[in-house]
Amino acid sequence: MQKDSSSVNVNAAGVAKNTYDAIVIGSGISGGWAAKELCEQGLKTLVLERGRNVEHLKDYPTATKAPWELEHRGRMPRKFLEENPLISKAAGFGEESAHFFIKDKDHPYVQEKPFDWIRGYQVGGKSLTWGRATQRWSNFEFTAPDRFGYGLDWPIRYNDVAPWYSHVEKFIGICGNKDGIEAMPDGEFLPPFEFNCIESHLQKKIKEHYKDRHLVHARWAHLTQPTELHLKQGRGKCQARNMCMRGCPYGGYFSSVSSTLPWAHKTGNLTVRPFSVVHSIIYDEQKGKATGVRIIDANTNEATEYFARIIFVNGSALNSTLVLLNSKSSRFPNGLGNDSGVLGKYVAFHLYRGSVSASIEGFEDRYTYGRNPTEPILANYRNLHKQDTDYFGGFTTFVGAYRPRGSEDASETELGAPFKSALSKPGGWRTYMYMQGETIPKASNHVRLSDTEKDQWGIPLLVTSVGYDDNDEKMIKDFLTQSSEMLAKAGCLDISPYDTHQAPGLDIHEMGGARMGRDPKTSILNGWNQVHHCKNVFVTDGACMTSTGNQSPSILYMALTARAASHAVEELKRKNL
């Protein structure tokens, strides 16, 4: 068990040198926002990142390379794949982006049930490789767990977050269209990318056949028409290259590295310390609050303590939960703020197993321009005002259409002049739908610290015990049936529903572990993302999620972070922290 801070020895140049106004654990999507907001408010802020440093422009080694300039033409060598069977399954992983993902053996964990934990440890975290979909949650999602009785009620509602959504959208740049859909609220949007002809056709046909289903331009973090605020960040218009996960030298999509961290740096209040593996948060029992963070240098294994008045935990959902679980003291023997025993429980994720593909004829005289990095979205139409299915929750449907080059007939040659000639001609149109479904947080789906196994820095390994349930299976079946029906009504052919049966985690949207709630007996955080029993610690990444909803979560993390940072500063001014 770790000792309380009264017995901690600072093995650096002294407490004063290691003291800041605020400490942020993690530099990804939410950590970057915490740094920006706190630095802008004048707080000297230390950002701790367990991985290496990454600088905008300088550290994007493949950003402008053509496929033939990559040593293996985009594919990873067999030896690498054999040594890294988990991380190489991640969406967007390839030779051009491998430098933004971990290697399996460097960061082990224990899978009590199959769970693919996808990670990227560097300054910027997964903001460099995220999907960039940025729909707002609707009030349906904040209220559904309580209204239908399948989960804990959120301590906040849409109106609590709406101004902060706007705050974030204006800064990072979101393209989209104001559609007036109740299940997917409008925001502060830049112009969207255009639909191609098939996407427009699907939109028209779905509208004809379903009064309650809306296929619209999705909301994505791409600068289609930069504002003065974006230009001040040094960012420019999205070039529609669709090579985002290499790091964008134009700053066309949002990342911590291109936007929030440089903005925080301009204030003169930011310090970023890479290679800092957080061991635990220091709790002072006499003061009744956290006083700092213990870290271990990833390169030297030297332990160091840093001190601050407030601490933001933004290490990503499971890592943040791990840090809290490992922050043990006499007051909190089961992890910081864990009087309820809820810490580590109610972990959930988004359901991505279902997809449907099809072909469509009749548009052979039409083609596309550029590489649109966005996709249309069919807003959730399930279980909104009432429960209209035999399962709980809803799903967002991502939709797209494309026209490959060359013959799709595998029996034809893939070498020589005939193949080269075929590549010069567009093939037939194809379309697809895939789901992003809500899952139900349950106490049985949990993570905990291993009693026996530790990592190279002496920190207990995380044990993941997370699986699917009958609700998930019913939702997948419904999605496949409904999506196939919609494509059939739109005139599509060769409709192929598919269930990947992939393990949870591969979606990268793991959530929960330190959920928000009104009652300290059933939650870890209050409505301001503060630890109920340690008010100067804020958790604003995916760990805070009370339920998963069906919208992409990253922009909600950013909005909650900005909201919590504002509250923290106000509380500091009132001397409440």
Image (cartoon, rainbow, N blue to C red):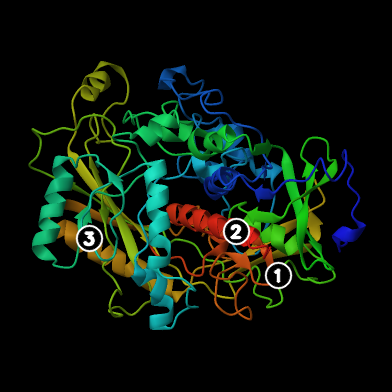
Q: Quadrant of the C terminus?
A: bottom right
Instruction: Specify whether 474 is left or right of 530.
Output: left
Residue 400 lies, with reference to residue 480, above or below; the image says above
Instruction: Say which mark, if any, is on residue 484.
Output: 3
Q: Is residue 491 visible?
A: no
Q: Residue 480: x and y, percent?
A: 29, 63
In the rendered image, which residue does mark 2 sit on?
Answer: 568
Residue 337 bears which disc, if any?
1
Q: Is residue 129 left or right of residue 222?
A: right
In primary-sequence order, the first of circles 2 and 3 is 3
Picture residue at 46% right of the left edge, 55% below the top = 559
Residue type, label 2: Ala
Give the Cα separation between the discs numbered 3 and 1: 47 Å
Dot 1 amino acid type:
Gly
Q: Quadrant of residue 335?
A: bottom right
Front-most of 246 and 520? 520
Image quarter of the N terminus: bottom right
Q: CA distance from mark 2 to mark 3?
A: 48 Å
How many C-alpha atoms fall within 10 Å of the one at disc 3: few (<14), some, or many (≥20)? many
Residue at the (33%, 80%) spot, across then down = 390
Q: Secondary structure at mark 2?
A: helix
